[in-house]
Image (cartoon, rainbow, N blue to C red):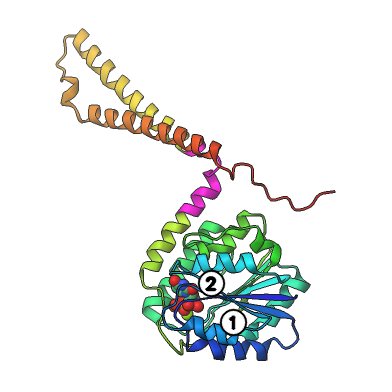
């Protein structure tokens, strides 16, 4: 089979029949399967999927709403095609873009091709502007030159999605997960974007806060996840040293003044003393955090999970 289309959906009943017809019209030259993942819809989406079921139209239904990442995860597990395409179910992503994305993977050797909603048809103030800022930050942090990291329309070599694990709300950063797994040929294709026809958006403004926190977690994990002591230990030692030097200064200063019969303040009378105390305590705490982190990393089942590309 050439393609697997993984389509996560939450309360998109009205859109589904049109979406299926549109996909069929756009992918005439391919053998493909459509995997609808119903993320706990309550509006009859599942009944619509049941009616559309066919040998190449499959459905997976969650018992409750888990989120888009969870839906993508089970969709990826079920996918059997050589190339896996994800798209939103709300008719905002156009399946007509898929053949070109597939060509880029097959002929230009991309591991992953992400859509770029160049002319985005969403609210300018609440979505488009924050999204630009978010993508700029994501580009800086991840080093992946994508304009639209979180575009729902993406195509992957099957290898990519079988070797990464989307969890939490990490669907926003699949290209980053892919890059961390060693798939670094990441391309981009400008895609048409439509206004939402039915229903309403499932994500509010909190997406940006969550998105930024997730980006920080991923960045930290990819750099120090397997060696937390390198981060916490070094900052802990630095802190401790700062505190130690301050303490020595305070003590020497006092002893010197005392010995020479000069006026001196009690150690606890000066601000530097409290700063020194704080630095020493923080240093020890950071060091301990690193140590605990090391023990967790050591017992993690992921600790020796390497991506082997080829063997002879
Ligand atoms: N979605 C989902 N589970 C959720 C929220 C959203 O499967 O908990 C699906 C949703 O049905 C749609 C896609 O994820 O197919 C993108 O959601 P939406 O269109 O609301 O996002 P937006 O286009 O506003 O960024
Ligand atoms: Mg949408």
- Residue 218 highlighted magenta (yes or no): yes
Tell me the residue at 70%/66% (across/down): 158
**Cα distance, mark 2 to mark 1?**
11 Å
The range drawn in magenta is: 217-231
* Residue 300 in view of the camera: yes
Q: How many marks?
A: 2
Q: Is residue 269 above or below residue 199?
A: above
Q: Is residue 176 above or below residue 25?
A: above
* Residue 120 in view of the camera: no
Q: Position of residue 145 (x, y in %)?
A: 59, 65
Tell me the residue at 59%/69% (across/down): 75
Q: Secondary structure at mark 2?
A: loop
Quadrant containing the N terminus is bottom right
Helix, strand or loop: magenta stretch: helix
Report which quarter residue 163 is drawn in.
Answer: bottom right
Q: Residues within 10 Å of mark 1 (few under 14, many from 20)?
A: many
Q: Nearer the viewer, residue 185 or 154?
A: 154
Residue 298 left/right relative to 129: right
Report which quarter residue 77 is drawn in.
Answer: bottom right
Q: Nearer the viewer, residue 33 or 138?
A: 33
* Residue under pointer 1: 191
* Residue under pointer 2: 148
Q: Secondary structure at mark 1?
A: loop
Residue 79 left/right relative to 152: right
Tell me the residue at 64%/68% (across/down): 78
Q: Nearer the viewer, residue 300 or 189?
A: 300
Q: Residues within 10 Å of mark 2 (few under 14, many from 20)?
A: many
Of mark 2 and mark 1, the one earlier in the sequence is 2
Residue 271 left/right relative to 56: left
């Amino acid at each position: 089979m050439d393609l697997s289309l993984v389509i996560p959906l939450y309360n998109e009943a009205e859109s589904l029949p049109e979406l299926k017809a549109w996909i069929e019209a756009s992918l005439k030259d391919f053998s493909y399967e459509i995997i609808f993942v119903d993320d706990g819809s309550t509006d009859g989406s599942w009944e619509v999927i049941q009616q559309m079921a066919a040998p190449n139209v499959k459905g997976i239904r969650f018992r409750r709403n888990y989120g888009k990442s969870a839906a993508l995860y089970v969709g990826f597990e079920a996918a059997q095609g050589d190339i896996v395409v994800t798209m939103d179910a709300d008719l905002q992503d156009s399946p007509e873009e898929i053949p070109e994305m597939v060509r880029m993977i097959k002929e230009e050797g991309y591991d992953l091709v992400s859509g770029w909603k160049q002319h985005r048809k969403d609210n300018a103030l609440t979505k488009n502007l924050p999204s630009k800022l978010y993508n700029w930050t994501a580009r800086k942090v991840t080093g992946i030159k994508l304009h639209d990291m979180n575009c729902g329309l993406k195509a992957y070599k099957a290898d990519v999605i079988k070797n990464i694990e989307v969890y939490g709300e990490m669907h926003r950063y699949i290209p980053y997960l892919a890059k961390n797994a060693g798939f670094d040929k990441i391309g981009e294709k400008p895609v048409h974007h439509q206004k939402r026809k039915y229903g309403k958006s499932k994500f509010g403004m909190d997406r940006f806060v969550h998105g930024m926190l997730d980006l920080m977690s991923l960045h930290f994990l990819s750099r120090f996840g397997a060696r937390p002591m390198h981060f916490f230990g070094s900052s802990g030692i630095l802190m401790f040293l700062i505190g130690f030097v301050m303490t020595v200064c305070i003590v020497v200063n006092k002893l010197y003044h005392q010995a020479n019969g000069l006026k001196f303040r009690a150690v606890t009378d000066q601000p530097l003393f409290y700063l020194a105390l704080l630095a020493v305590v923080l240093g020890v705490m950071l060091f301990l955090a690193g140590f605990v982190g090391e023990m967790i990393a050591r017992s993690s089942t992921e600790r020796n999970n390497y991506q082997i590309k080829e063997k002879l």
